[in-house]
Image (cartoon, rainbow, N blue to C red):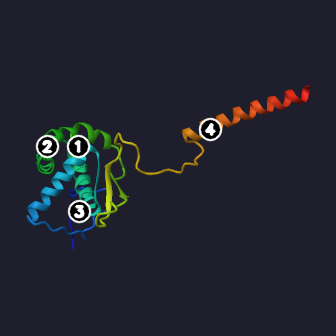
Amino acid sequence: MNQANIEHLVSKLRYNVKPRRRFSNPDGPEGRLRKFQKTLTALIRYERLELNYRRADETRGYVDQLISEAIRHGPAHKETMDMANFWIIEKELVHKLFKVLVPRYQNYTTSFTKIHKAPHIYPEQYYERAILELRGNIYPSVEQYNPHERNLLHNLLLDAAKKEYRMEKYKEVADNIKQ
């Protein structure tokens, strides 16, 4: 059987979207979509959000899909603009998508978002919390690096201070020996 090659028709995401997520909403599917529209709009505006892990995980797929379509087709493509107008509630952020985010992610080979597990809020019920962020944002990194890494700035400054202190002590010992 001959089958058509349709890979070029479907854009490729930078990570796998898992179909296991189901969210219920009292307003039905429209209310569920409205929640994701608000979350996606807030993520494009602030570039980092803290929210429920399940919502962050599903919103991540929509954000990556929107950005990859914007990179692939650009603002002149009607379907891409319709998709951007549907998902982004605040229309001034559509310009941010095409003028700021598309140039930033033009040469990325990984996903455009990062998701980190966050600690839950203690007295309330236990919900998995997450931090969803766009890569390359202006905020400090959420990931904690090894503080004992040799090339970090504070370690370099401490090493220089130790070296200077030792040199002064060696000089004092040498002066005491000469006398």
Amino acid at dot 2 = Glu
Q: In which quadrant of the rendered view does residue 8 lie?
A: bottom left
Residue at 20% in and 65% down: 4
Decide which of 171, 47 is in the foreground and name it. Answer: 171
Examine the image and state in which quarter residue 107 appears: top left
Which residue corresponds to the image point at 11% horizontal and 48% vertical from the top-left? 82
> What is the CA distance from the residue labelled 3 to the residue labelled 1?
38 Å
Residue corresponding to mark 4: 158
Spatial CA distance of label 2 from label 4 is 48 Å
Q: Between disc 2 and disc 4, whose residue precedes?
A: 2
Q: What residue type is disc 4 on?
A: Leu
Quarter of the C terminus within the rendering: top right
For the residues bearing labels 2 and 1, Cβ distance under 8 angstroms: yes
* Front residue of 124 and 28: 124
Q: What residue sits right under mark 2 in the picture?
A: 90
Give the number of the mark in front: 2 or 4.
4
Task: Give the numbered dot on residue 5.
Answer: 3
Q: Nearer the viewer, mark 1 or mark 4?
A: 4
In depth, the one of 172 and 130 nearer the eye is 172
Instruction: Give the x, y percent position of residue 158.
Output: 62, 38
Mark number for residue 45? 1
Which one is closest to the eye, mark 3 or mark 1? 1
Tell me where residue 67 appears, x and y as whole percent: 24, 48
Marks 2 and 1 sit apart, C-alpha to C-alpha, by 9 Å
